[in-house]
Image: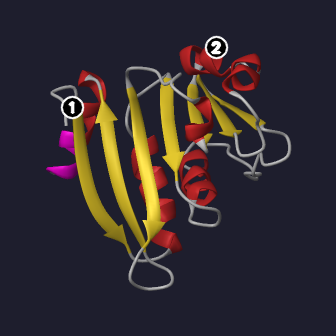
């Protein structure tokens, strides 16, 4: 691990804990950037996104962007762009979706970010979800890249 990244590993016991993690991450004071959500189909990436988005006042129904590729949520002073890149075929298609504009304009929650190839922003938060020992549990690895995310993760996990 390089000096510019910080990693935490833990287990979430159930879907409610995944929703709470999304809400906890949403409490971090960030107005733009990328949160990359890695994991297999059905592992909880959209559940995390729902927890994140529902933490904002006025959030209505959160719809998975599997077919639309993008759902935009606008709240007082912040935009959340929820991308699902599963059905994309190339990094160029993703660039055409305006993902880098979204990263600069608001928070981009990106499911299936591995489809971006090598086009990752330098400062970002990566969240890896995988199956835990119990059916409902999930192993989580969170990696923060850049000084901002390192500081935020230290604050979050040392309180």
Q: Which residue reaches farthest right?
A: 67
Q: Which residues are magenta?
A: 154-158
Could you tell which of marks 1 and 2 lies nearer the N-terminus?
2
Location of residue 73 in the rendering, given as x and y in whole percent from the top left corner: 70, 35
The answer to the question of whether label 1 and label 2 lie on touching residues, with beta carbons closer than 8 A, is no
Residue tagged 1: 151
Within the image, what quadrant is residue 68 found in? Answer: top right
Location of residue 113 in the rendering, given as x and y in whole percent from the top left corner: 57, 38
Between residue 79 and residue 97, name the one nearer to us. Answer: 97
> What element does badge 1 sit on?
helix
> What element does badge 2 sit on?
helix
Between residue 103 and residue 159, name the one nearer to us. Answer: 103
Seen at 60% across and 46% down, the residue is 53
In the picture provided, is 99 more to the left or to the right than 12?
right
What colour scheme does the image use? secondary structure
In the picture provided, is 110 more to the left or to the right than 96?
left
Between residue 26 and residue 115, name the one nearer to us. Answer: 115
Q: Is residue 25 above or below residue 11?
A: above
Q: What secondary structure is the stretch in magenta mostly built from?
A: helix
In the picture provided, is 34 more to the left or to the right than 42?
left
Residue tagged 2: 101
Within the image, what quadrant is residue 116 found in? Answer: top right
Gap between marks 1 and 2 measured at Cα: 25 Å
Location of residue 41 in the rendering, given as x and y in whole percent from the top left corner: 64, 62
Location of residue 99 in the rendering, given as x and y in whole percent from the top left corner: 65, 22
Question: Alpha-carbon neighbours of circle 2 within 10 Å: few (<14), some, or many (≥20)?
Answer: few
């Amino acid at each position: 691990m390089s000096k510019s990244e910080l990693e935490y590993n833990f287990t979430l016991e159930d879907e409610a804990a995944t929703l709470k993690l999304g809400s906890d991450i949403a409490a971090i004071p960030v107005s733009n950037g990328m949160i990359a959500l890695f994991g297999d189909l059905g592992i909880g990436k959209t559940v995390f996104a729902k927890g994140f988005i529902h933490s904002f006042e006025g959030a209505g129904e959160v719809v998975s962007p599997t077919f639309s590729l993008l759902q935009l949520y606008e709240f007082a002073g912040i935009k959340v762009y929820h991308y699902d890149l599963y059905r994309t075929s190339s990094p160029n298609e993703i660039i055409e979706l305006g993902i880098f504009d979204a990263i600069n304009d608001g928070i981009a929650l990106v499911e299936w970010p591995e489809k971006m190839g090598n086009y990752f922003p330098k400062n970002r938060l990566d969240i890896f979800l995988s199956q835990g020992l119990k059916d409902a549990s999930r192993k989580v690895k969170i990696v923060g890249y850049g000084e901002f995310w390192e500081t935020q993760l230290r604050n979050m996990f040392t309180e």
